[in-house]
Amino acid sequence: MRNNLPAVPADTTFRGSFAAKLRAVDRAQQRHPATALPVAVYKKFGDDNGGQLAGLISYYAFFSLFPLLLVLVTVLGLVLHGNTTLQQQIETSSLASFPIIGTTIRNNLHSLNVGGLPLAIGLITALLAGLGVTHATQIAQDRMWDIAPAHRNSWLRWRLRGLALLAILGAINIAATVIDGWVDAGSAHSVLGTLAALVVSLVLDLALFVAVFVLLTSYPAKVREILPGAIMATVLWQILQFAGGYIVVHELKHTTDTYGLFAIVLGTLAWLHIGAQATLYAAQLNVVRSKHLWPRALLGDGD
């Protein structure tokens, strides 16, 4: 028996109507730069497996963080042996940049006054782990800039760039901790002096991210190309540090009493992974802007 009911058009069904509305929203976001650029960054980040790349960076960063902080505290103990007050100010300021593990190390500083062979081992470990972080970051940025493996930096070149970045990181960290210690010690008696010191710290962070986005990629990046991403990364890292400090003070303190080492390790890994993702999103912003890869469609394969 033949069915005489009229055929229902596909676009009048609930599914068809919902899909049509999604397509309309997708077309609308592509017409407005305020939404098209962030969406394009988000889409390309997923296409490049940015989450996995961030996981690789945070893995190496986790293993480099412990020896780097231990070496920092040990060196301060040796260099500033006669100035306990300044040593404590710089230690507190520097370790505050790592709100989860920094608190634990600061509470156990009495066990870190060592030198000689332990310090040499710590330096070597920190150097190797730090190069692991820089290499993982170079791999991530090369993929984002779509650099073919045959055109990427050579074995020697990427290691030299990694060493240069680590040297810049050390110099900026020393300068930033001295400035923070100056502010915490009350040397900046006026609000203007304190504000100036904070601005200098932000500028140092910005300089660090500029160095990261220029040195740790095979793409011949120019400062004007990567400056927007560097600014974004600086802002995101400041927010992340404040958020991490708040969580440590109000939430993680009670958690560590219950779960101890597990809370510290998992909290540190989560903090590093979020930080790595924030950095790679900022790098992706540079790529999308420089190569004009926006607007992009969220639905379907076409851009």
Image (spheres, rainbow, N blue to C red):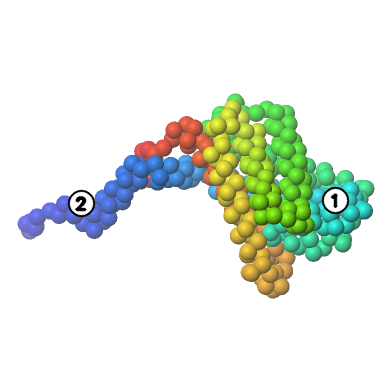
Residue 126 vs 151, above or below: the answer is below
* Pointer 2 residue: 11
Residue 226 vs 60, above or below: the answer is above
Q: Is mark 1 on a helix, strand or loop?
A: helix
Query: Percent x, y for residue 123?
Result: 83, 45
Residue farthest top in this picture: 151
Q: In this view, does 293 lie to the left or right of 196?
A: left
At 40% across and 46% down in the image, what residue appears?
Answer: 35
Q: Residue 163 carries which label?
A: none
At 20% across and 51% down in the image, what residue appears?
Answer: 11
Camera-side residue of 46 and 103: 103
Query: At label 2, which amino acid type do we have?
Result: Asp
Q: Are marks 1 and 2 in contact (CB under 8 Å)?
A: no
Q: Can residue 261 be seen in this view?
A: yes
Query: Percent x, y for residue 229?
Result: 55, 40
> Counting other residues with Cα less than 10 Å from the Cα at mark 2, is it few (<14), some (14-19), or many (20 or more)?
few
Indicate which label's residue lies in the foreground, 1 or 2.
1
Q: Is mark 2 on a helix, strand or loop?
A: helix
Q: Quadrant of the N terminus?
A: bottom left
At 70% across and 32% down in the image, what residue appears?
Answer: 161
Q: Is residue 55 visible?
A: no
Camera-side residue of 9 and 266: 266
Residue 168 vs 96, above or below: the answer is above
Residue 123 vs 258, above or below: the answer is above
Determine the image quadrant of residue 255.
bottom right
Camera-side residue of 68 and 90: 90
Query: Marks 1 and 2, Cα distance to the nearest angstrom?
Result: 70 Å
Camera-side residue of 156 and 288: 288
* Pointer 1 residue: 76
